[in-house]
Amino acid sequence: MKRALASLCAVFALGACQTMQTPTPPLTRAQSELSNVQVVTSPGGITAWLVSETFVPSIAMQVSWQGGSAAEPVGKDGLGWVLGYMMNEGAGDMDTTAYGARMQDLNMEFACGVWVDWTTCGLSTLKATADDSFEMMRLAFNKLRMDDEPFERAKRELAVGLKESESNPKSVSGRAMNDALIPGHPYARYATAETVSSIRKQDVIALKSRLMTRDRLMVVVVGDITAEELKPKLDLVFGTLPTGQPPMVLPDAVAKSAQAHPIIKQLPQPQTLILFSGPGVRRDDPDFFAAYTLNYILGGGGFSSRLVDDVRERRGLTYGIATGLSIQPHYWRWTGSTSTMNDKAEEVIRLIRENIARLGKDGPTEAELVDAKAYLTGAFPLSFDSNAKTASNLLGFWQDGQGADYVQHRNEYFEAVTLDDLKRVASQYMKPEDFTFVMVGQPVTD
């Protein structure tokens, strides 16, 4: 069955803050609807965030549980991926073919994914077929099948993907970075052919029971459905999920000191991928919004950022370069990446270090602060131009620990950032000696 995971945005709740550059727009329908996120509780005690709007006769639902692949037993890495794969491969009296055909008949999409920290499922359906679509979802959660053919297919596809990742620069660089900074932590674990071959059906069922529990459930619904219509659906779909499973408790990942020289991973290709990572900011840190604004100025603002202006526009050394704040619950980093010609890799790293150092020493300008605020606040409504994107972004806010009224106040937090805040945060975090660099390719080095 087709893997329909594109609508799931569980990992980076931060992405809800990332928008396209545009002048401040007038109030949009999406923004006005979001001014009233309802907190709905079903008769059975299941809570959901609801944005009810009838403009388009469709419904999007995003569901999440804290806990993910980090909960996999040692030696069973890849188990969560198989669980996500199996969630739409048959349920009740419908095998893979019948379940897929029924989804097509209903014009519904339903898929799940198990990431490191979160387990997430997404549903999109038409209003006219919503009742049947919710029933399909209920069957997946309560009467999931583990037929031999899709189960073995899942393992084969994962094994093939792992083999391909060995020559994927992004996979190689990410693994090298984790091995260098947080070796041994669950965040640094990865599946192998051996761990995948050891996965059994009972392992998948056990992980599902541990992750998909009623007590850690988060549900966001956006679309043509009222609170009274939604309440019984919540009990129908989720009412019989297990409870009382202890949450997975992970230690914070404490990064090792940055390496003085770039880590080089040889991979035959015409360009070198550069990944860099330094200390970052927790999502609940009072300086988060200042750090996010500063990141826009450094490399998060597309063509408005310093790194793009220097490395791409002025020198033509790369097609693109970007930075971001990675805010996993137990690991928070300032990260960035770019690609360049093999013989220019060292020069690009030197320029990145110089830009980080300059920003840390002098801080940004008032003009850069004004531009960043206009971008981050003015384009925010464009993150909510569909039911699916709205549901995904709201779920991200919830995962970040924000309240249902966060959308109403989010821009205020950016407007409150001052130039002194940016300079203080820059002096603390913009230290090139604290950044580790990984090069993947065939870089020419001295």
Image: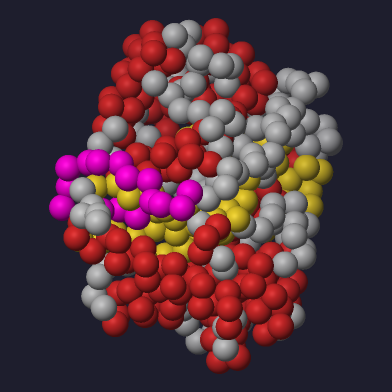
Rendered image coloring scheme = secondary structure
Residue sitting nearer the eye, 43 or 361: 361
Q: In this view, does 273 lie above or below 378?
A: above
Numbered marks: total: 0
Residue at figure coordinates x 57%, y 47% from the top left: 257
Q: Residue furthest bottom?
A: 367
Single out the residue that lies furthest toward the front: 446
Q: Is residue 143 visible?
A: no
Q: Quick check: is 91 in the magenta stretch?
A: no
Q: Quadrant of residue 231?
A: top right
Instruction: Identify which residue is drawn at 47% across, 82% down.
Output: 22
Is any atom of residue 181 visible in this view? Answer: yes
Q: Quadrant of the N terminus?
A: top left
Of residues 347 and 86, which is closer to you in this image? 347
Q: Is residue 384 above or below residue 229?
A: below
Kindly identify the residue that appears in the image at 65 percent across and 32 percent down. 67
Which part of the image, by quadrant, shows the C terminus? bottom left
Residue 183 location (% of width, % of height): 54, 32
Please provide the residue range marked out in magenta.
Answer: 259-274
Camera-nearest residue between 281 and 123: 281
* Residue 175: % across, % down: 42, 37
Q: Residue at x 33, y 28 (%)?
A: 162
Residue 266 on the magenta segment: yes
